[in-house]
């Protein structure tokens, strides 16, 4: 009798595992800048061998999500658009930005490369493009309490599943003409929560949406620092040439002329960002 009872219990648990899933389950989504810009493992080749990025000021910037094959678990297209507005506002606060365009991600083809990026930049009349990419991993495990899932009540009331979501968001700003990476800003988040068997999907979607939003906020905070650091490199290290969009004159360290105003603007922007972080 004991053997029969054990066998019956095993069948019940096995059937329940088939119904609700068993063991550890893992799924994820990724929109990789490298996969988009360098499809099929292509090597980086700048537009010209000795080209130094020339940022025309006031700058015109395009902002867009890198395409992926599937969407984040808990983030809709409307959510992504709202989150991009936060990044747009960060750029808007800079005195040397003329305008920033939020570009629908449908204009970027998967593995489209720099050719696709240049087409979109021309369409929107921008010189710089900020590519927002993300990686999100969703994992669920059954804990000891999941043994009670063999009862219908247990499947609805017992938190026998442990759910974890890890999110990485990154903004990489490229000069389209020279294909040079000017600066980047990352943001990360990880969170977990228990759930019943029948509410695994809802819990994962909620965690994914919250994690994505927090990672985006962290990224926009780091974007402030990256912009300030970029201003220093452009002003002091000569890694980037700053050109006045209106006059065509080149900004030079310590130089005068029509571009001197931009030196002051960059100094003020960098100082303001440093004070705000403190």
Image: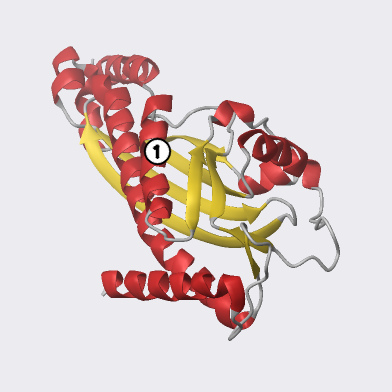
Residue 235 percent location from the top left of the image: 56, 78
Quadrant of the image containing the C terminus: bottom left
Q: Residue furthest right?
A: 49
133 left or right, relative to 140 = right
Q: Position of residue 232 (x, y in %)?
A: 51, 77
| Left or right: 185, with 218 as reference point | right
Vertical side of 249 occupied by 174: above or below: above
Q: Residue furthest bottom?
A: 254
Q: Position of residue 191 (x, y in %)?
A: 29, 47
Q: Which sits in the foreground, 81 or 97? A: 97
At horizontal 37% and vertical 56% (from top left) the residue drawn is: 93
How crowded pointer 1 is (Cα within 10 Å; few <14, some 14-19, many 20+) is rated as some
Name the residue tied to disc 1. Answer: 139
Q: Kindly identify the residue that appears in the image at 28 percent across and 31 percent down.
A: 206
In this orientation, which residue lies closer to the viewer: 188 or 260?
Answer: 260
Which corner quadrant holds the N terminus?
Answer: top left
Position of residue 99 in the picture relative to residue 118 (left or right):
left
Is 61 placed above or below 258 here? above
- Is residue 223 or residue 151 the one in the foreground? 223
């Amino acid at each position: 009798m004991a053997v029969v009872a054990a066998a019956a219990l095993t069948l019940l648990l096995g059937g329940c595992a088939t119904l609700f899933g068993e063991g550890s389950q893992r799924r994820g989504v990724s929109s990789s800048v490298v996969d988009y810009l360098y499809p099929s493992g292509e090597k980086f080749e700048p537009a010209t061998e000795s080209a130094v990025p020339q940022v025309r000021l006031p700058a015109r910037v395009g902002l867009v999500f890198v395409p992926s094959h599937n969407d984040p678990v808990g983030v809709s297209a409307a959510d992504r658009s709202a989150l991009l507005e936060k990044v747009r506002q960060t750029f808007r606060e800079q005195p040397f930005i003329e305008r920033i365009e939020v570009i629908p991600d449908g204009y970027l083809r998967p593995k489209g490369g720099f050719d696709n990026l240049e087409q979109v930049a021309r369409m929107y009349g921008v010189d710089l493009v900020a590519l927002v990419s993300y990686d999100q991993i969703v994992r669920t495990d059954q804990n000891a309490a999941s043994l009670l899932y063999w009862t219908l009540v247990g499947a609805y009331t017992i938190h026998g599943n442990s759910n974890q979501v890890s999110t990485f968001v990154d903004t990489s700003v490229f000069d389209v003409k020279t294909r040079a990476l000017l600066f980047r800003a990352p943001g990360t988040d990880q969170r977990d929560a228990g759930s019943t068997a029948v509410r695994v999907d809802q819990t994962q979607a909620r965690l994914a949406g919250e994690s994505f939003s927090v990672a985006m906020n962290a990224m926009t905070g780091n974007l402030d620092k990256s912009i300030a650091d970029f201003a220093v490199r452009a002003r002091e290290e000569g890694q980037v040439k700053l050109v006045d969009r209106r006059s065509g004159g080149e900004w030079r360290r310590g130089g005068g002329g029509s571009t001197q105003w931009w030196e002051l603007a960059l100094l003020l922007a960098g100082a303001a960002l440093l004070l705000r972080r403190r």
